[in-house]
Image (cartoon, coloured by chain):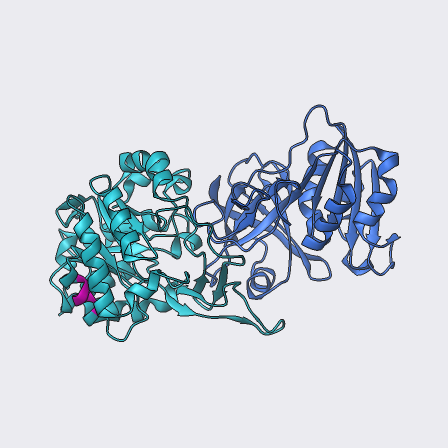
Amino acid sequence: MREVTATILENIRIAENIYSLTFATEDELKVRPGQFCMVGVAGFPLRRPIAVCKAEGERITVCYQLKGGGTRALAETYKQGEKLSVLLPLGNGFYVGEQEQRVALVGGGVGIFPLISVIRAYQGKKQLFSYMGFRNRAAYCMPYELQRSDRLVVATDDGSMGYHGTSVQAFMEEIEEIKPDIILSCGPVPMLHALKKATEGRNIPVYVSLEERMGCGIGACLVCVCEKTDGAHARVCKDGPVFNINEVAL
Amino acid sequence: MADLSLQLCGVKLKNPVIPASGTFGFGREFNELYDISCLGGVATKGLTLKPRLGNPVPRIAEGKSVILNAVGLQNPGVEAFIENDLEWLKSKTRVLANVAGSTIEDYSEICARLDGLVDFVELNISCPNVKCGGMAFGIRPETIEEVTRAAKGSLKRTPLIVKLSPNVESIALNAQAAERGGADAISLVNTFTGMVIDIEKRKPLLANMTGGVSGAGIKPIAVRMVYEASRAVHIPVIGMGGICTAEDAVEFLMAGATAVQVGTHNFTDTFACPKIIAGLHDWCDRHGVSHVTSLTGALQ
């Protein structure tokens, strides 16, 4: 974990309300798939937690959705060549064990971006089956990255592209066929709920990356907690953001 | 180079900059980014006798130049702190153990447990985010005096700092009540109770509905309260509320503070405290100030 002053290489719109921000750090950083960073936005007291999508040496790409004033300011006022204060890499990230060869990735909305970092990390090393859900065709993005998977199913809520339905539904139609050793997922809570219900009793480990409003991003302030199934609280920023789906009360 | 060291209630601090309770945990996470032994001390996350889970999420929201938090005193309990973190933290810097309770007895008991183990106890009678206790003790002078006296009665060796709420009628009267109760110092301000609403959803942004407002936006009010409190008492005052820079810290010192705490800005700039310490050196040198202590109450 470090604080870096990064130089923006690109900050562009890639889909409806979605921006891709690429910055260069001073030197190479080791970033695990599924880790995130805290991006400082001038004029806003809180940094914005954003999942790392691509990490190539000193080039890091994160993708964010326009949600409020902070992300709008990030999209509108930060241009190529400008400096950006970033804390990274943060959190635990996704991990695929040696025994686990067949990896299913189930993503929805902005949840696809941390999964892209998994695809990039394990491409050619594991069998990757991706099920990625979008609201509609206009929200679909990063096709080149998603197509690095051995199999890609795009699902849209309105059927304007690919499978008509959710990524969980698309995944469950193929689960028997692909026989995944592990399932990694990120997306809205109702989607994670659906995934938990659908995969219960199958004895396949499922890991999910959670999102929560954060303060410090490094585990000190106890703002971004999630409830665990044993009743305790875990810090999403430090103990997560990736948890075994059975460990957390969704 | 200016001397930033000071004596606070007979305890030497290497400088007057202390991260504020709740923004810094027990220091371990920030120590991964910089060596926290550079700090004057650390005010710990608020401790209670038993572990507390705190409030539901979301626990944080943002306004213009301010944030609101409603963590609700989540903490592992005083015993876990003593067992897992205290020795390490003491090896790094001065420890201000921030403590909270639901009853007067809670406060005496937790103070008795920490007596002699920490450098200071900071009595949190000003947390706006818990249903009973917390701020309930910190509103009226009579209860402030009573809880302070009870805490002081349990502290034979460790100086007592009473952290005051700004959500009150008269900060001067409350400061005097803490002094009468036996406080060795006071710290202020804790957060202002506030609320933010998501107008699209027509719902409060915080699960707790209301939360404590902190950050740069509250600084002028905090400076005024530190000024009023410091003139009302004869014990040292630790000032806080929106400090982001060394100049902000100097302002609090001039208003009457002996030391300062930095809270919210630790989130905005992880290196806020070391930068403020370096900035204080610079400022003192540029202004011919040889001892930082000479700035306390140095209004002309």
Q: Residue furthest top?
A: A99
Question: Vertically, is B111 above or below A125?
Answer: below
**Residue B242 seen in render:** no
How far from the left and from the top, in percent, is residue B191?
Answer: 36, 64
Question: Vertically, is B194 above or below A181?
Answer: below
Placement of the C terminus of chain B among the 4 image quadrants: bottom left
Decide which of A8, A49 is in the foreground and name it.
A49
How far from the left and from the top, in percent, is residue A44?
Answer: 48, 62
How far from the left and from the top, in percent, is residue B118?
Answer: 24, 42
Magenta stretch, residue numbers = B174-178
Tell me what residue is drawn at x 28 percent, y 44 percent: B39
Tell me what residue is drawn at x 80 percent, y 45 percent: A131
Decide which of A12, A186 is in the foreground and name it.
A186
| Dominant SS type (magenta) | helix
Question: Vertically, is B46 above or below B85?
Answer: below
How many numbered marks are there? Answer: 0
Relative to residue A101, is residue B240 drawn left or right?
left
How far from the left and from the top, in percent, is residue B143?
Answer: 24, 66
Tell me what residue is drawn at x 71 percent, y 49 percent: A192
Relative to residue B140, is residue A165 drawn left or right?
right
Which chain did the image draw in cyan? B
Check residue B177 for magenta coloring: yes
**Residue B39 seen in render:** yes
The colour chain A appears in is blue
Decide which of A153, A82 is in the foreground and name it.
A153
Relative to residue A178, is residue A68 drawn left or right?
left
Check residue A196 for magenta coloring: no
Decide which of A238, B38 is in the foreground and name it.
A238
Relative to residue B168, is residue A87 drawn left or right?
right
